[in-house]
Amino acid sequence: MELVLVIAQIVALLCLSALCIYMIVVLLRVRDIMTNVEKDVKEIAARTVPVLENMEYITSRVKSITDSIDDQVTAVRESIASIKMIADNVVDLERRVQYRIEGPILETVGFVSAVFKGVRTFLDRVRT
C-alpha cells in the first residue's frame, strides 16, 4: 500500500510539474501579448498626439473664422441699415420736393395751356 501511495505521489508530482511547465509557457505567451499590446498602445498614442494637436489648431481656426464671420455679418447688417436709412431719406426728399413743386408746376402748365388756347381762339377769330 505504501508503494501505491508513493506511486500516486510521484504521479501527482509529475502532473503538478507538467501543470507548472504549462503555466510557465502560458505566462510567457501572455507576457509577449502584453508586450505587443504595450507597443501598439504606444504607437497609437504617438500617432494620436499630432492628430489631437491638429484638431486643436483646426478648432482654434474655426473659432477665429466664426468670429470673423460674425463681425462681417454685423458690419453688413449695419451697412444695410445705413442704406435703408439713406433710401428712406431719398424717398422722403422726393415726396417733399414733389409736394412743394408739383402744385406750382401744375398751375403754370394750366396757365400756359389756357394762354395758348386763348391765343389760338383769338387767331381763329381773327382769321375768320
Image (cartoon, rainbow, N blue to C red):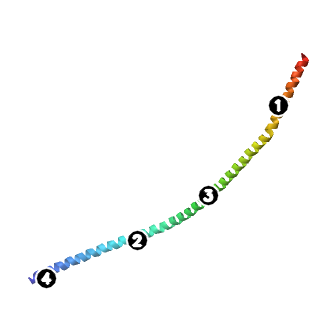
Of the two numbered discs 3 and 2 on the same chain, state the one appearing first in sequence: 2
Q: Secondary structure at mark 1?
A: helix
Q: Nearer the viewer, residue 47 or 102?
A: 102
Task: Tell me if residue 68 comes above or below residue 9 in the rendering.
Answer: above
Whole-percent x, y for residue 105 in the image? 82, 36
The tag earlier along the polypeptide, 1 or 4, is: 4
Residue designated by label 4:
6
Pair 3/2: label in front: 3
* Label 4 CA crowd tier, 10 Å (few <14, some 14–19, many 20+): few
- Give, as a three-letter code, the residue at label 3: Asp
State how far apart marks 3 and 1 are (Cα): 58 Å
Earlier residue among tags 1 and 2: 2
Kindly identify which numbered label has been placed on residue 14: none
Which residue is found at the position 10% from the left and 80% from the top? 4
Residue 40 shown left or right of residue 89 in the figure: left
Q: Which residue position holds label 3?
A: 70
Q: CA distance from mark 4 to mark 3?
A: 91 Å
Query: Which residue lies under the disc numbered 1?
Result: 110
Q: Is residue 114 above or below residue 98?
A: above
The label on residue 38 is: 2
